[in-house]
Image: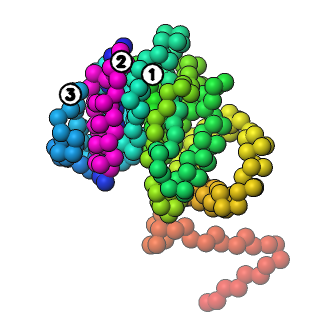
Amino acid sequence: MELTVVIPVHRGRERALARLLRTIVEASPSACAPVEVLIISRDLPDLEARVRALVGSVPIPMRAAFFPAARTLAELRNAGLRAVRTAWVHFLDSDTFLARDHFARLEQAVRAHDPTIACFQLDFAPAPGTSGWAQYEAEIDRWAIGRYINEERVRGLNGMGVLARVEALRSLGGFDPEFVAAEDIELGYRLAQARIPVVFLRDVRIFHAYPARWWDLLRRKFWHGQGYGQLLLRHPTFVREISAPPRPSLLAACRRPRFLAYALISHAVFLLGVGVALARRLFSRRRAALADAPAEIPTSDSPAGTPPAPVPRRGPGDATHETG
């Protein structure tokens, strides 16, 4: 099985990317080891030189592609999907890293499933040593993502760790480039609607380095909320696919006041992001309706281009006054 690792990266993530590349290089040999690493960026034209300065020589073939016209992460992912030359693609986020036996466990898990499976969703965990705020955010993420990604069914994707057949993703047009976030969930939902099988691999886990500061976490939450708003506008039926949270988790949260306070603030910021996306769509529709409204018909006796006021109709009892 030949696969390409695709990593979208933004400015400021070079050191995180270097750590990820080191874990890829140091991973145990496996039939699932990548034959190429493809790095996609929109704001780092000299990315390959920067990476080699941090990592040194990389024994795995590595390409760096620069797409300055990309507006969203979805467009970067699609650029990588178009450039892949292998049958499989392994998407990883630049702020993740891998265990040494990652590809060996991936090979074992893939071989244990039907060969017709087109997509595998990997599990995730917070990076060791992350801040308490990041631990809270990771716990909330696992709670939220578990509502649509679990061992019983997968109704969305988590783009920080996905293995998929290239043709399966290309057949659906890849990621929606209009989404500012949640483009991975949206693609996963379309995979489910198209009945393309997706399997959750709980035994294969990547590590995600969350931001350490709470305000960075809330900014991330606001951004994700906007993506969820776009998702609900595009697929209103997605809410039916979200399973209810287990009641014991809510009771446990009430026993942890600091975590509960952060969870409430985090969800409020998230819902604010959803509201911004909904309001933006409402205003854009109103602007479009005004632009498509028929123009007033100009008349010859109306210099301003508006029809003159109609002459009131006279009744039978109205007098006519004429002056000589």
Give the residue pinned by disc 1: 106
The Cα atoms of the two marked residues, 1 and 2, are separated by 9 Å
Badge 1 or badge 2: first in the primary sequence: 2
Residue drawn at (66%, 24%), measured in percent from left and top?
152
Q: Is residue 30 magenta?
A: yes
Residue drawn at (60%, 28%), measured in percent from left and top?
154
Circle 3 packing at 10 Å, graded few (<14), some (14-19), many (20+), is: few
Q: Residue furthest right?
A: 317
Badge 3 or badge 2: first in the primary sequence: 2
* Mark 3 secondary-structure assignment: loop
Report x, y in % for residue 54: 21, 45
Q: Is residue 209 visible?
A: yes
Q: Nearer the viewer, residue 194 or 283?
A: 194
Tag 3 and tag 2, C-beta contact below 8 Å: no
Give the residue pinned by disc 3: 59
The amino acid type of the residue labelled 2 equals: Ser
Residue drawn at (35%, 15%), measured in percent from left and top?
31
Give the residue pinned by disc 2: 30
**Which residues, given as a range, are shown in magenta?**
13-41
Report x, y in % for residue 98: 40, 34
Tag 1 and tag 2, C-beta contact below 8 Å: yes
Report x, y in % for residue 217: 50, 57
Give above or below for 122 relative to 216.
above
Q: Nearer the viewer, residue 67 or 49?
A: 49
